[in-house]
Amino acid sequence: GIQVEQSPPDLILQEGANSTLRCNFSDSVNNLQWFHQNPWGQLINLFYIPSGTKQNGRLSATTVATERYSLLYISSSQTTDSGVYFCAAIQGAQKLVFGQGTRLTINP
Amino acid sequence: GAVVSQHPSRVICKSGTSVKIECRSLDFQATTMFWYRQFPKQSLMLMATSNEGSKATYEQGVEKDKFLINHASLTLSTLTVTSAHPEDSSFYICSAIHWRYGYTFGSGTRLTVV
């Protein structure tokens, strides 16, 4: 089955910094999503992005499907951005395959 | 937006007992729901796909007799952990697909078996 790899596994930044999270996938996918899991475990859907670029406030994402990767950009980080960021690929049968996540810590 | 409600949020049970977790789509119908398990500091692993009115589809390695799934209506799926043991302690999360908002997740259930 498809493999989804995320990097870096951990990232510690100061408030106000920018960051780029990467997601590589091993095969062509129907779609790709980015999620944020907050410290209480709730998963929030950030982007549903099979290709191209989308922006929502300080967050944006770009997927280059032909090269099998996606990037999540966070600008002007805030402490509330802390948590784990997952990308997940959708390959047939609507099944999500998750990467291992990037644990982001934003220090004040 | 789409809302998926999951209950309970936290449960502690004794070894050998059964625990039922409910997952409801509050403002949309979901013919398909998904159940995931997440161990500490690990990713989400799909356990099974719940299909309204039919049997669930389990992922390889997941015991269907231990993790009973029932999807009796278009808004409710339940996961029952039978004869729970300490190794079943984990964070269980359900999700459903909304036509506009994509995958939407419940808030999760933290199960502790003592």
Image (tube, coloured by chain):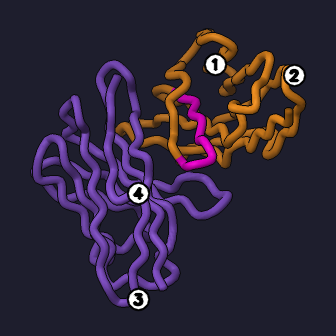
Secondary structure beneath dot 1 equals strand
**Callout 4 amino acid:** Ser
With B1 as the anchor, is A26 left or right in this view? right
* Front residue of A59 and A82: A82
- 10 Å crowding of disc 2: few (<14), some (14-19), many (20+): few
Q: Please give the range of residues in magenta.
A: A32-41
Residue beneath the point at 47% across and 63% down: B110
Residue beneath the point at 25% across and 39% down: B25
**Which of pointers 1 and 2 indicates the residue nearer the eye?**
2
* Front residue of B87 and A105: A105
Residue designated by label 4: B9
Residue designated by label 3: B15
Marks 3 and 2, how far apart in space? 47 Å
Marks 3, 2 in one chain: no
The chain under label 1 reads A
**Callout 2 amino acid:** Ala
- Residue B47 lies within the magenta run: no
